[in-house]
Image (cartoon, rainbow, N blue to C red):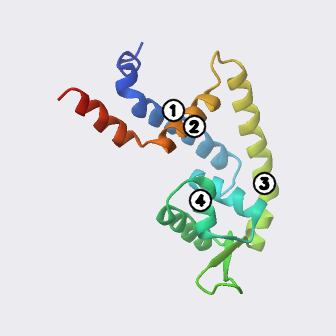
Amino acid sequence: MDFMSEMAELALASRLRRLSDIYWQGVTATYRQSGVDFDVRWATIFVLISQQGPVAVMEIAERLGITHPAVIQVINELEKHGLVVSTKSEQDGRKRLLTLSETGQAMLPKLQPLFDAFIAVNKSMLTQQTHNLLMSLQDMEAQLSERSFFDRIQDQLNQHK
């Protein structure tokens, strides 16, 4: 057993990061091997825009549960690579509405088989688990949406004072 596993609860965030890094490396290598110029960081926003577009930046942030600046950063990269275009909303000129560009639309058929493979591999691995990781993550996220991790830590520290 590796040391992070031995640290159990203390290393939970580090183990999640390590697992994420393993996934990102595999996905990045798959994109590269397939000759697709695509970054793993773009995937969730790209897919959301492809399925829901035109969509506003704030809506993306809310739907994915990530910060507005994080969405803006990815959108800027997607625009720089010509995969999305933004237009001003006719109802609210302050809103940017995002859709896939022609280049982004053309990339979808190249990405879809890769996305399908990612889904199939994840489903296979999840069915082999005693406890479904996706359900466990959902439970943890729900608990943290009710009360932040920081607040929970502060409560724990105050109990020992």
Q: Which residue is mark 2?
A: 23
Q: Which mark is residue 110?
A: 3
Q: Secondary structure at mark 3?
A: helix
Quadrant the N terminus occupies: top left
Q: Nearer the viewer, residue 70 or 143?
A: 143
Determine crowd level at label 3: few under 14, some 14-19, many 20+ residues with C-alpha closer than 10 A. some
Rendered position, 58 above or below 136: below
Q: The disc labelled 2 sits on which kind of residue?
A: Tyr
Q: Which mark is residue 62?
A: 4
Secondary structure under the numbered disc 4 in the rendered image: helix
* Left or right, residue 85 beside residue 28: right
Q: Earlier in the sequence, mark 3 or mark 4?
A: 4
What's the residue type where badge 4 is placed?
Answer: Glu
SS at mark 2 in the image: helix
Q: Residue at x 71, y 48 (%)?
A: 34
Mark 4 Cα shell of 10 Å, populated few (<14), some (14-19), many (≥20):
few
Element under label 1? helix
Image x and y of residue 134, in percent: 63, 32
Q: On the image, numbered disc 1 is attached to which residue?
A: 19
